[in-house]
Image (cartoon, rainbow, N blue to C red):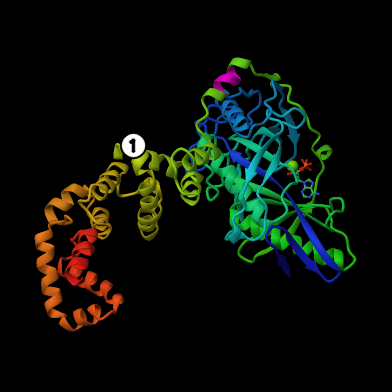
Amino acid sequence: MTTETASSYRIQGATGEWEVVIGLEVHAQITSNAKLFSGASTAFGAEPNTQVSLVDAAMPGMLPVLNKECIRQAVRTGLALGAEINRVSRFDRKNYFYADLPQGYQISQLYHPLVGEGSIPIEPDAKDGPGEAKLVGVERIHVEQDAGKLMHDQHPTRSYVDLNRSGVALMEIVSRPDMRSPAEAGAYLRKLRSILRYVGSCDGNMEQGSMRADVNVSVRRPGEPFGTRTETKNVNSVRFVMAAIEQEANRQVDVLEAGGRVVQETRLYDPDRGEGRSMRSKEDAHDYRYFPDPDLLPLELSEAFIAECEASLPELPDDKRARYEGPLGLPAYNAAVITADVETARWFEALLDATGKPETMAKAASNWLISDLFGALNRLGKGIGESPVSPAQGAELLNLVADGTLSGTLAKQVFEIMLETGDDPSKIVEERGLKQTSDTGAIEAIIAQVMEANADKVAEYRGGKDKLFGFFVGQTMKAMGGKANPAVVNELLKKALG
Ligand code: ADP
Ligand code: MG
Protein backbone atom coordinates (compact mmCIF):
# COMPACT_ATOMS: atom_id res chain seq x y z
CA MET A 1 0.00 0.00 0.00
CA THR A 2 1.23 3.47 -0.82
CA THR A 3 0.55 6.52 1.35
CA GLU A 4 0.10 9.63 -0.72
CA THR A 5 0.75 13.08 0.64
CA ALA A 6 1.19 16.30 -1.29
CA SER A 7 4.85 15.78 -2.00
CA SER A 8 6.27 12.63 -0.51
CA TYR A 9 5.80 9.14 -1.75
CA ARG A 10 6.17 6.39 0.86
CA ILE A 11 5.58 2.68 0.84
CA GLN A 12 3.81 1.58 3.99
CA GLY A 13 5.16 -1.77 5.16
CA ALA A 14 4.11 -3.85 8.16
CA THR A 15 7.11 -2.50 10.07
CA GLY A 16 6.90 1.15 9.01
CA GLU A 17 7.47 3.48 6.09
CA TRP A 18 9.94 3.11 3.25
CA GLU A 19 11.34 5.68 0.89
CA VAL A 20 12.14 4.90 -2.74
CA VAL A 21 15.37 6.04 -4.42
CA ILE A 22 15.56 6.14 -8.22
CA GLY A 23 18.31 6.84 -10.74
CA LEU A 24 17.78 6.60 -14.50
CA GLU A 25 20.22 5.76 -17.26
CA VAL A 26 18.65 6.88 -20.52
CA HIS A 27 19.92 5.66 -23.87
CA ALA A 28 19.05 8.21 -26.53
CA GLN A 29 19.77 7.56 -30.18
CA ILE A 30 21.61 10.52 -31.62
CA THR A 31 19.95 12.11 -34.65
CA SER A 32 22.48 11.64 -37.42
CA ASN A 33 22.31 10.25 -40.95
CA ALA A 34 25.36 8.08 -40.41
CA LYS A 35 26.56 5.82 -37.60
CA LEU A 36 29.05 6.75 -34.88
CA PHE A 37 32.10 5.20 -36.54
CA SER A 38 30.95 4.41 -40.09
CA GLY A 39 29.11 5.98 -42.99
CA ALA A 40 26.23 3.45 -42.98
CA SER A 41 22.70 4.86 -42.85
CA THR A 42 20.68 4.99 -39.63
CA ALA A 43 17.21 5.26 -41.22
CA PHE A 44 14.52 3.41 -39.24
CA GLY A 45 12.60 0.47 -40.68
CA ALA A 46 14.94 -0.68 -43.47
CA GLU A 47 15.18 -4.34 -44.54
CA PRO A 48 17.45 -6.29 -42.16
CA ASN A 49 21.19 -6.03 -42.82
CA THR A 50 20.91 -3.45 -45.59
CA GLN A 51 22.60 -0.70 -43.58
CA VAL A 52 25.76 -2.40 -42.45
CA SER A 53 29.25 -1.23 -43.37
CA LEU A 54 32.33 -3.42 -43.01
CA VAL A 55 33.10 -1.54 -39.79
CA ASP A 56 29.65 -2.33 -38.33
CA ALA A 57 30.06 -5.99 -39.26
CA ALA A 58 33.49 -5.98 -37.59
CA MET A 59 35.38 -7.31 -40.59
CA PRO A 60 39.07 -7.83 -39.81
CA GLY A 61 41.23 -4.79 -40.33
CA MET A 62 38.40 -2.26 -40.44
CA LEU A 63 39.02 0.94 -38.50
CA PRO A 64 36.46 3.20 -36.85
CA VAL A 65 36.32 6.85 -37.97
CA LEU A 66 34.54 9.18 -35.56
CA ASN A 67 31.46 10.98 -36.93
CA LYS A 68 31.77 14.65 -35.93
CA GLU A 69 28.02 15.27 -36.21
CA CYS A 70 27.31 12.76 -33.42
CA ILE A 71 29.77 14.53 -31.14
CA ARG A 72 28.26 17.90 -32.04
CA GLN A 73 24.77 16.67 -31.08
CA ALA A 74 25.96 15.21 -27.78
CA VAL A 75 27.80 18.44 -26.91
CA ARG A 76 24.71 20.51 -27.77
CA THR A 77 22.69 18.21 -25.48
CA GLY A 78 25.19 18.68 -22.67
CA LEU A 79 25.04 22.45 -23.06
CA ALA A 80 21.23 22.35 -22.98
CA LEU A 81 21.47 20.56 -19.61
CA GLY A 82 23.86 23.22 -18.34
CA ALA A 83 26.53 20.53 -18.11
CA GLU A 84 30.28 20.62 -18.11
CA ILE A 85 31.74 19.80 -21.53
CA ASN A 86 34.98 17.89 -21.16
CA ARG A 87 37.63 19.30 -23.47
CA VAL A 88 39.30 15.90 -23.59
CA SER A 89 37.38 12.63 -23.59
CA ARG A 90 38.25 9.12 -24.63
CA PHE A 91 36.70 5.97 -26.00
CA ASP A 92 36.96 2.65 -24.18
CA ARG A 93 36.19 -0.89 -25.20
CA LYS A 94 33.59 -2.65 -23.07
CA ASN A 95 34.23 -6.33 -23.71
CA TYR A 96 31.53 -8.95 -23.77
CA PHE A 97 30.25 -11.66 -26.07
CA TYR A 98 26.80 -11.55 -27.55
CA ALA A 99 25.51 -12.62 -30.96
CA ASP A 100 24.30 -9.11 -31.79
CA LEU A 101 27.77 -7.65 -31.12
CA PRO A 102 30.15 -8.80 -33.88
CA GLN A 103 33.14 -6.85 -32.53
CA GLY A 104 33.02 -8.68 -29.22
CA TYR A 105 33.14 -5.28 -27.54
CA GLN A 106 31.14 -2.08 -27.50
CA ILE A 107 32.98 1.21 -27.97
CA SER A 108 31.84 3.42 -25.09
CA GLN A 109 33.28 6.01 -22.69
CA LEU A 110 33.78 4.89 -19.11
CA TYR A 111 36.68 6.82 -17.63
CA HIS A 112 36.54 10.10 -19.54
CA PRO A 113 33.02 10.84 -20.80
CA LEU A 114 32.29 13.68 -23.23
CA VAL A 115 29.90 15.48 -20.86
CA GLY A 116 30.10 15.86 -17.08
CA GLU A 117 27.77 17.23 -14.38
CA GLY A 118 24.53 18.92 -15.39
CA SER A 119 20.93 18.99 -14.22
CA ILE A 120 17.29 18.87 -15.27
CA PRO A 121 14.52 20.84 -13.50
CA ILE A 122 11.38 18.74 -13.09
CA GLU A 123 7.79 19.43 -12.08
CA PRO A 124 5.89 16.19 -11.45
CA ASP A 125 2.32 16.07 -12.68
CA ALA A 126 -0.05 15.71 -9.72
CA LYS A 127 -2.10 13.12 -11.58
CA ASP A 128 0.94 10.81 -11.55
CA GLY A 129 1.02 10.84 -7.74
CA PRO A 130 3.18 12.58 -5.13
CA GLY A 131 6.44 14.22 -6.12
CA GLU A 132 8.33 17.49 -5.79
CA ALA A 133 9.46 20.17 -8.20
CA LYS A 134 13.25 19.95 -8.02
CA LEU A 135 16.53 19.88 -9.87
CA VAL A 136 17.60 16.33 -10.73
CA GLY A 137 21.35 15.93 -11.12
CA VAL A 138 22.82 14.48 -14.30
CA GLU A 139 26.09 12.77 -13.53
CA ARG A 140 27.40 12.42 -17.08
CA ILE A 141 26.59 11.85 -20.72
CA HIS A 142 28.78 9.48 -22.65
CA VAL A 143 28.68 8.49 -26.27
CA GLU A 144 28.64 4.86 -27.35
CA GLN A 145 27.66 2.40 -30.08
CA ASP A 146 24.37 0.55 -30.16
CA ALA A 147 24.33 -3.23 -30.73
CA GLY A 148 22.42 -5.13 -33.42
CA LYS A 149 19.11 -6.86 -32.88
CA LEU A 150 18.31 -10.55 -32.47
CA MET A 151 15.04 -12.00 -33.68
CA HIS A 152 13.83 -15.39 -32.54
CA ASP A 153 11.46 -17.67 -34.44
CA GLN A 154 9.61 -20.40 -32.58
CA HIS A 155 8.69 -22.71 -35.48
CA PRO A 156 11.21 -23.92 -36.38
CA THR A 157 13.45 -22.67 -33.61
CA ARG A 158 15.83 -20.26 -35.27
CA SER A 159 17.50 -16.99 -34.41
CA TYR A 160 18.41 -14.21 -36.79
CA VAL A 161 20.57 -11.17 -36.38
CA ASP A 162 19.94 -7.75 -37.92
CA LEU A 163 22.98 -5.49 -37.81
CA ASN A 164 21.28 -2.33 -39.09
CA ARG A 165 21.38 -0.86 -35.59
CA SER A 166 24.94 -2.06 -34.96
CA GLY A 167 27.17 0.99 -34.55
CA VAL A 168 24.38 3.58 -34.35
CA ALA A 169 25.38 6.43 -32.01
CA LEU A 170 23.79 6.60 -28.58
CA MET A 171 24.10 9.09 -25.77
CA GLU A 172 23.83 7.52 -22.35
CA ILE A 173 22.47 10.15 -20.01
CA VAL A 174 23.04 9.07 -16.40
CA SER A 175 21.06 10.74 -13.63
CA ARG A 176 22.00 11.04 -9.99
CA PRO A 177 19.85 8.92 -7.65
CA ASP A 178 17.79 12.06 -6.95
CA MET A 179 14.25 10.91 -7.70
CA ARG A 180 11.96 9.71 -4.90
CA SER A 181 8.74 8.60 -6.61
CA PRO A 182 7.37 7.21 -9.87
CA ALA A 183 5.88 10.65 -10.60
CA GLU A 184 9.32 12.28 -10.32
CA ALA A 185 10.84 9.67 -12.64
CA GLY A 186 8.00 10.25 -15.13
CA ALA A 187 8.52 14.01 -14.96
CA TYR A 188 12.27 13.56 -15.49
CA LEU A 189 11.80 11.42 -18.58
CA ARG A 190 9.23 13.76 -20.09
CA LYS A 191 11.40 16.78 -19.45
CA LEU A 192 14.49 15.10 -20.84
CA ARG A 193 12.58 14.01 -23.94
CA SER A 194 11.24 17.53 -24.37
CA ILE A 195 14.77 19.01 -24.19
CA LEU A 196 16.21 16.41 -26.60
CA ARG A 197 13.48 17.22 -29.11
CA TYR A 198 14.02 20.97 -28.82
CA VAL A 199 17.76 20.50 -29.28
CA GLY A 200 17.12 18.08 -32.14
CA SER A 201 19.74 15.63 -30.89
CA CYS A 202 17.28 12.71 -30.51
CA ASP A 203 13.72 12.25 -31.75
CA GLY A 204 12.68 10.94 -28.32
CA ASN A 205 10.53 8.24 -29.89
CA MET A 206 10.23 5.61 -27.17
CA GLU A 207 8.02 3.24 -29.24
CA GLN A 208 10.68 2.96 -31.93
CA GLY A 209 13.31 2.47 -29.25
CA SER A 210 15.22 5.66 -29.97
CA MET A 211 14.94 6.51 -26.28
CA ARG A 212 14.91 3.82 -23.58
CA ALA A 213 15.58 3.82 -19.88
CA ASP A 214 17.43 1.58 -17.45
CA VAL A 215 15.68 2.05 -14.14
CA ASN A 216 17.72 1.81 -10.92
CA VAL A 217 15.61 1.39 -7.80
CA SER A 218 16.37 0.92 -4.11
CA VAL A 219 14.40 1.44 -0.92
CA ARG A 220 15.42 2.68 2.53
CA ARG A 221 13.99 3.96 5.76
CA PRO A 222 13.59 7.73 5.41
CA GLY A 223 16.88 9.39 6.38
CA GLU A 224 18.95 6.18 6.28
CA PRO A 225 21.81 5.58 3.79
CA PHE A 226 20.93 4.24 0.32
CA GLY A 227 19.97 0.58 0.07
CA THR A 228 21.13 -1.96 -2.52
CA ARG A 229 19.66 -1.23 -5.94
CA THR A 230 18.46 -3.30 -8.84
CA GLU A 231 18.53 -2.18 -12.44
CA THR A 232 15.57 -2.87 -14.74
CA LYS A 233 16.76 -2.73 -18.35
CA ASN A 234 15.38 -1.13 -21.48
CA VAL A 235 11.99 0.11 -20.36
CA ASN A 236 10.40 1.79 -23.35
CA SER A 237 7.62 4.10 -22.19
CA VAL A 238 7.15 6.67 -19.45
CA ARG A 239 4.15 4.80 -18.13
CA PHE A 240 6.07 1.52 -17.96
CA VAL A 241 8.97 3.20 -16.16
CA MET A 242 6.59 4.45 -13.48
CA ALA A 243 4.88 1.07 -13.22
CA ALA A 244 8.21 -0.78 -13.06
CA ILE A 245 9.38 1.45 -10.18
CA GLU A 246 6.17 0.94 -8.23
CA GLN A 247 6.35 -2.80 -8.73
CA GLU A 248 10.06 -3.17 -7.97
CA ALA A 249 10.03 -0.92 -4.90
CA ASN A 250 7.15 -2.89 -3.42
CA ARG A 251 8.94 -6.14 -4.15
CA GLN A 252 12.06 -4.90 -2.34
CA VAL A 253 10.02 -3.81 0.66
CA ASP A 254 8.44 -7.29 0.82
CA VAL A 255 11.88 -8.92 0.66
CA LEU A 256 13.30 -6.67 3.41
CA GLU A 257 10.29 -6.98 5.68
CA ALA A 258 10.47 -10.75 5.41
CA GLY A 259 14.03 -10.52 6.75
CA GLY A 260 15.72 -11.05 3.39
CA ARG A 261 18.16 -8.83 1.54
CA VAL A 262 17.95 -7.19 -1.87
CA VAL A 263 20.38 -8.68 -4.37
CA GLN A 264 22.07 -6.30 -6.81
CA GLU A 265 20.81 -7.64 -10.11
CA THR A 266 19.66 -6.81 -13.60
CA ARG A 267 15.94 -7.24 -14.10
CA LEU A 268 13.39 -7.13 -16.90
CA TYR A 269 9.94 -5.60 -16.69
CA ASP A 270 7.06 -7.29 -18.47
CA PRO A 271 4.43 -4.61 -19.12
CA ASP A 272 1.79 -7.16 -20.17
CA ARG A 273 1.92 -8.90 -16.82
CA GLY A 274 2.88 -5.81 -14.83
CA GLU A 275 5.72 -7.69 -13.18
CA GLY A 276 9.48 -7.81 -13.16
CA ARG A 277 11.82 -10.76 -13.15
CA SER A 278 15.49 -11.31 -12.54
CA MET A 279 17.64 -11.57 -15.66
CA ARG A 280 21.13 -11.94 -14.26
CA SER A 281 23.21 -10.87 -11.29
CA LYS A 282 24.62 -7.45 -12.05
CA GLU A 283 28.10 -7.16 -13.50
CA ASP A 284 30.51 -4.58 -12.18
CA ALA A 285 32.61 -2.37 -14.42
CA HIS A 286 35.66 -4.57 -13.88
CA ASP A 287 33.81 -7.59 -15.33
CA TYR A 288 33.93 -5.92 -18.76
CA ARG A 289 37.70 -5.40 -18.75
CA TYR A 290 37.31 -1.87 -20.05
CA PHE A 291 40.41 -0.45 -21.72
CA PRO A 292 41.07 2.55 -23.98
CA ASP A 293 40.28 1.72 -27.60
CA PRO A 294 43.69 1.69 -29.35
CA ASP A 295 42.05 2.46 -32.72
CA LEU A 296 40.81 5.85 -31.57
CA LEU A 297 42.75 8.90 -30.44
CA PRO A 298 41.55 10.86 -27.42
CA LEU A 299 38.91 13.35 -28.51
CA GLU A 300 39.92 16.99 -28.03
CA LEU A 301 37.36 19.74 -28.50
CA SER A 302 38.31 23.28 -29.47
CA GLU A 303 36.70 26.27 -27.78
CA ALA A 304 35.47 27.39 -31.19
CA PHE A 305 33.64 24.09 -31.74
CA ILE A 306 31.93 24.35 -28.35
CA ALA A 307 30.99 27.98 -28.97
CA GLU A 308 29.49 26.98 -32.30
CA CYS A 309 27.45 24.24 -30.58
CA GLU A 310 26.24 26.75 -28.01
CA ALA A 311 25.27 29.30 -30.66
CA SER A 312 23.24 26.69 -32.50
CA LEU A 313 20.94 25.96 -29.56
CA PRO A 314 17.31 27.06 -29.90
CA GLU A 315 15.28 28.69 -27.14
CA LEU A 316 14.80 25.83 -24.64
CA PRO A 317 11.45 24.78 -23.12
CA ASP A 318 11.82 26.49 -19.72
CA ASP A 319 12.93 29.78 -21.28
CA LYS A 320 10.14 29.64 -23.80
CA ARG A 321 7.61 28.90 -21.10
CA ALA A 322 8.81 31.87 -19.02
CA ARG A 323 8.56 34.13 -22.08
CA TYR A 324 5.04 32.89 -22.87
CA GLU A 325 3.90 33.47 -19.31
CA GLY A 326 5.70 36.78 -18.92
CA PRO A 327 5.95 39.05 -21.97
CA LEU A 328 3.34 37.16 -23.98
CA GLY A 329 0.88 37.01 -21.07
CA LEU A 330 -0.41 33.46 -21.53
CA PRO A 331 -2.11 31.68 -18.63
CA ALA A 332 0.43 29.43 -16.87
CA TYR A 333 -1.38 26.27 -17.92
CA ASN A 334 -1.43 27.25 -21.59
CA ALA A 335 2.26 28.18 -21.52
CA ALA A 336 3.16 24.83 -19.94
CA VAL A 337 1.10 22.73 -22.34
CA ILE A 338 2.26 24.49 -25.49
CA THR A 339 5.96 24.58 -24.64
CA ALA A 340 6.20 20.95 -23.47
CA ASP A 341 6.48 19.76 -27.06
CA VAL A 342 8.67 21.57 -29.57
CA GLU A 343 6.41 20.80 -32.50
CA THR A 344 3.41 22.30 -30.71
CA ALA A 345 5.44 25.38 -29.77
CA ARG A 346 6.54 25.85 -33.38
CA TRP A 347 2.98 25.47 -34.64
CA PHE A 348 1.77 28.01 -32.09
CA GLU A 349 4.44 30.51 -33.10
CA ALA A 350 3.59 30.08 -36.79
CA LEU A 351 -0.08 30.62 -35.90
CA LEU A 352 0.69 33.78 -33.93
CA ASP A 353 2.89 35.19 -36.69
CA ALA A 354 0.19 34.52 -39.24
CA THR A 355 -2.40 36.54 -37.28
CA GLY A 356 -0.24 39.59 -37.92
CA LYS A 357 -0.80 40.78 -34.34
CA PRO A 358 1.04 38.39 -32.05
CA GLU A 359 0.81 40.65 -28.98
CA THR A 360 -2.96 40.95 -28.89
CA MET A 361 -3.87 37.53 -30.26
CA ALA A 362 -1.64 35.37 -28.05
CA LYS A 363 -4.16 34.42 -25.41
CA ALA A 364 -7.05 33.71 -27.80
CA ALA A 365 -4.71 31.74 -30.06
CA SER A 366 -3.43 29.63 -27.17
CA ASN A 367 -6.96 28.86 -25.99
CA TRP A 368 -8.08 27.92 -29.48
CA LEU A 369 -5.05 25.69 -30.01
CA ILE A 370 -5.47 23.85 -26.71
CA SER A 371 -9.21 23.35 -26.80
CA ASP A 372 -10.41 23.38 -30.41
CA LEU A 373 -7.39 22.17 -32.36
CA PHE A 374 -6.19 19.63 -29.77
CA GLY A 375 -9.77 18.40 -29.37
CA ALA A 376 -10.07 17.85 -33.12
CA LEU A 377 -6.65 16.19 -33.41
CA ASN A 378 -7.51 13.87 -30.54
CA ARG A 379 -10.72 12.82 -32.26
CA LEU A 380 -8.82 12.24 -35.51
CA GLY A 381 -6.01 10.40 -33.74
CA LYS A 382 -3.46 12.74 -35.33
CA GLY A 383 -0.42 14.58 -34.07
CA ILE A 384 0.00 18.32 -34.54
CA GLY A 385 2.39 17.67 -37.43
CA GLU A 386 -0.50 16.05 -39.33
CA SER A 387 -3.07 18.75 -38.61
CA PRO A 388 -5.52 19.10 -41.52
CA VAL A 389 -5.68 22.83 -40.74
CA SER A 390 -2.55 24.94 -41.30
CA PRO A 391 -1.32 27.69 -38.94
CA ALA A 392 -2.26 30.27 -41.59
CA GLN A 393 -5.83 28.94 -41.78
CA GLY A 394 -6.08 28.89 -37.99
CA ALA A 395 -4.89 32.49 -37.88
CA GLU A 396 -7.48 33.54 -40.44
CA LEU A 397 -10.20 31.96 -38.34
CA LEU A 398 -8.98 33.74 -35.19
CA ASN A 399 -8.91 37.05 -37.05
CA LEU A 400 -12.50 36.56 -38.23
CA VAL A 401 -13.52 36.17 -34.60
CA ALA A 402 -11.43 39.14 -33.49
CA ASP A 403 -13.00 41.50 -36.07
CA GLY A 404 -16.54 40.39 -35.18
CA THR A 405 -17.27 38.57 -38.47
CA LEU A 406 -17.73 35.30 -36.57
CA SER A 407 -19.16 34.62 -33.13
CA GLY A 408 -17.59 31.90 -31.01
CA THR A 409 -20.37 29.51 -32.01
CA LEU A 410 -20.02 30.26 -35.71
CA ALA A 411 -16.25 29.91 -35.46
CA LYS A 412 -16.72 26.39 -34.14
CA GLN A 413 -19.01 25.56 -37.07
CA VAL A 414 -16.55 27.02 -39.57
CA PHE A 415 -13.71 25.09 -37.94
CA GLU A 416 -15.59 21.81 -38.32
CA ILE A 417 -16.05 22.54 -42.03
CA MET A 418 -12.36 23.45 -42.35
CA LEU A 419 -11.46 20.06 -40.88
CA GLU A 420 -13.67 18.28 -43.38
CA THR A 421 -12.91 20.24 -46.52
CA GLY A 422 -9.50 21.78 -45.89
CA ASP A 423 -10.93 25.09 -47.17
CA ASP A 424 -9.92 28.51 -45.90
CA PRO A 425 -12.32 30.00 -43.33
CA SER A 426 -12.99 33.13 -45.42
CA LYS A 427 -14.12 30.95 -48.34
CA ILE A 428 -16.40 28.92 -46.05
CA VAL A 429 -17.94 32.07 -44.54
CA GLU A 430 -18.51 33.52 -48.02
CA GLU A 431 -19.97 30.39 -49.61
CA ARG A 432 -22.22 29.37 -46.74
CA GLY A 433 -23.23 32.81 -45.55
CA LEU A 434 -22.01 32.08 -42.05
CA LYS A 435 -21.25 35.67 -41.20
CA GLN A 436 -22.37 36.96 -37.86
CA THR A 437 -24.81 39.79 -38.16
CA SER A 438 -24.96 42.93 -36.05
CA ASP A 439 -27.76 44.31 -38.20
CA THR A 440 -29.97 45.80 -35.47
CA GLY A 441 -33.03 46.07 -37.71
CA ALA A 442 -32.97 42.35 -38.51
CA ILE A 443 -32.34 41.38 -34.90
CA GLU A 444 -35.10 43.65 -33.59
CA ALA A 445 -37.56 42.12 -36.03
CA ILE A 446 -36.75 38.63 -34.75
CA ILE A 447 -36.97 39.78 -31.13
CA ALA A 448 -40.44 41.17 -31.79
CA GLN A 449 -41.51 37.79 -33.24
CA VAL A 450 -40.06 35.88 -30.29
CA MET A 451 -41.82 38.14 -27.80
CA GLU A 452 -45.14 37.82 -29.62
CA ALA A 453 -44.90 34.02 -29.68
CA ASN A 454 -44.07 33.94 -25.96
CA ALA A 455 -46.31 36.62 -24.53
CA ASP A 456 -46.84 34.60 -21.31
CA LYS A 457 -43.09 34.43 -20.66
CA VAL A 458 -42.72 38.13 -21.38
CA ALA A 459 -45.28 38.81 -18.70
CA GLU A 460 -43.50 36.51 -16.24
CA TYR A 461 -40.18 38.18 -16.99
CA ARG A 462 -41.64 41.62 -16.45
CA GLY A 463 -43.18 40.29 -13.24
CA GLY A 464 -39.68 39.65 -11.90
CA LYS A 465 -38.61 36.26 -13.24
CA ASP A 466 -35.14 37.47 -14.39
CA LYS A 467 -33.94 33.97 -15.13
CA LEU A 468 -36.05 33.95 -18.28
CA PHE A 469 -33.64 36.33 -19.99
CA GLY A 470 -31.50 33.42 -21.12
CA PHE A 471 -34.56 31.82 -22.70
CA PHE A 472 -35.14 34.90 -24.88
CA VAL A 473 -31.48 35.00 -25.88
CA GLY A 474 -31.66 31.34 -26.86
CA GLN A 475 -34.87 31.75 -28.87
CA THR A 476 -33.54 34.80 -30.71
CA MET A 477 -30.21 33.11 -31.53
CA LYS A 478 -32.02 30.01 -32.71
CA ALA A 479 -34.37 31.99 -34.95
CA MET A 480 -31.31 33.72 -36.45
CA GLY A 481 -29.50 30.43 -37.13
CA GLY A 482 -26.84 31.26 -34.56
CA LYS A 483 -25.62 34.12 -36.72
CA ALA A 484 -26.58 37.09 -34.57
CA ASN A 485 -23.90 38.92 -32.67
CA PRO A 486 -24.61 37.83 -29.07
CA ALA A 487 -23.58 41.16 -27.57
CA VAL A 488 -26.02 43.01 -29.84
CA VAL A 489 -28.78 40.48 -29.10
CA ASN A 490 -28.29 41.00 -25.37
CA GLU A 491 -28.41 44.72 -25.65
CA LEU A 492 -31.52 44.82 -27.88
CA LEU A 493 -33.37 42.25 -25.78
CA LYS A 494 -32.76 44.24 -22.61
CA LYS A 495 -34.23 47.26 -24.33
CA ALA A 496 -37.26 45.44 -25.73
CA LEU A 497 -38.10 43.56 -22.52
CA GLY A 498 -37.29 46.36 -20.11
P1 ADP B 1 26.88 1.36 -12.76
O1 ADP B 1 28.17 1.88 -13.30
O2 ADP B 1 27.01 0.08 -12.07
O3 ADP B 1 25.79 1.35 -13.78
P2 ADP B 1 26.47 3.90 -11.49
O4 ADP B 1 27.07 4.30 -10.21
O5 ADP B 1 26.99 4.51 -12.73
O6 ADP B 1 26.47 2.34 -11.58
O7 ADP B 1 24.93 4.22 -11.38
C1 ADP B 1 24.06 3.87 -12.35
C2 ADP B 1 22.72 4.47 -12.02
O8 ADP B 1 22.23 3.97 -10.79
C3 ADP B 1 22.72 5.99 -11.87
O9 ADP B 1 21.63 6.51 -12.58
C4 ADP B 1 22.57 6.20 -10.38
O10 ADP B 1 21.85 7.38 -10.13
C5 ADP B 1 21.76 5.00 -9.96
N1 ADP B 1 21.97 4.61 -8.57
C6 ADP B 1 23.16 4.48 -7.94
N2 ADP B 1 22.95 4.07 -6.67
C7 ADP B 1 21.62 3.92 -6.50
C8 ADP B 1 20.78 3.51 -5.41
N3 ADP B 1 21.27 3.14 -4.24
N4 ADP B 1 19.45 3.48 -5.62
C9 ADP B 1 18.93 3.83 -6.79
N5 ADP B 1 19.66 4.22 -7.84
C10 ADP B 1 20.99 4.27 -7.71
MG1 MG C 1 25.41 1.76 -15.84
Image coords of residue 325 (percent x, y): 49, 43
Q: Would you say residue 164 is visible in this rendering?
A: no
Q: Give how far across and how far down residue 489 sits, in percent.
A: 20, 63
Residue 285 among those drawn in magenta: no
Mark 1 sits near ligand 1, with its Cβ under 8 Å away: no
- Residue sitting farthest toward the bottom: 456
Determine whether 153 is above or below 495 in the image.
Answer: above
- Magenta-tinted stretch: 305-309
Q: Can residue 280 be seen from the camera position used here? A: yes
Q: Is residue 456 above or below residue 191?
A: below
- Based on the displayed image, in which of its 4 quarters is residue 390 positioned? top left
Seen from the viewer's position, the closer of residues 150 and 306 is: 306
**Which residue of the protein is positioned furthest toward the right in this rendering?**
259
Considering the numbered disc 1 on the image, is that residue within a helix, a strand or a loop? Answer: helix
Which residue is the site of mark 1? 353
Q: Residues within 10 Å of mark 1 (few under 14, many from 20)?
A: some
Along the line of sight, which residue is nearer the eye, 70 or 402?
A: 402
Q: Is residue 411 left or right of residue 47?
A: left
- Residue 308 counted in the magenta span: yes
Q: Main secondary structure of the magenta part?
A: helix
Q: Amino acid at mark 1?
A: Asp
Which quarter shows the C terminus? bottom left
